[in-house]
Amino acid sequence: MANVTLPQIDERLKLLPPDKLAVVYDFVSYLTEREAERALKETASTAYQTMSASESVLRRDWDRPEEDNAWANL
């Protein structure tokens, strides 16, 4: 796909009638929301992977008699 600049898009948009601008706006809004959802899913996936990777390390620290004693009265 060729690189397109905002000024090039702006030039083309100026040639469209208002009803077509509404269609373009809806499409751009859809693309923006889809990208935001993708980024959110990617962030959530990374956070989950980090949590899963650290679980075994934390388990070694938490599953000790000293920890059990420290929390026994709570």
Image (cartoon, rainbow, N blue to C red):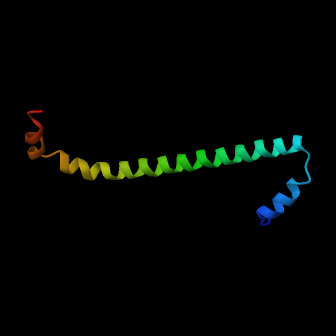
Tell me which corner region of the image, top left, top right, bottom left or bottom right, holds residue 7: bottom right
Query: Residue at (48%, 46%) from the top-left corner?
Result: 44
Residue 41 percent across, percent down from the top left: 54, 46
The correct choice, above or below, for 1 with respect to 38 in the image is: below
Query: Residue at (39%, 52%) from the top-left corner?
Result: 50
Question: Which residue is at the front of the view, 17 or 70?
Answer: 17
Question: Which residue is at the front of the view, 73 or 33?
Answer: 33
Total marks shown come to 0
Residue 40 percent across, percent down from the top left: 54, 47
- Along the horizontal axis of the image, is 21 left or right of 40? right
The correct choice, above or below, for 9 with respect to 69 in the image is: below
Query: Residue at (88%, 57%) from the top-left corner?
Result: 12
Residue 69 percent across, percent down from the top left: 7, 40
Q: Quadrant of the C terminus?
A: top left
- Along the horizontal axis of the image, is 55 left or right of 72? right
Query: Residue at (80%, 66%) from the top-left corner?
Result: 2
Q: Quadrant of the N terminus?
A: bottom right
Residue 19 percent across, percent down from the top left: 88, 40
Question: Which residue is at the front of the view, 20 or 54?
Answer: 20
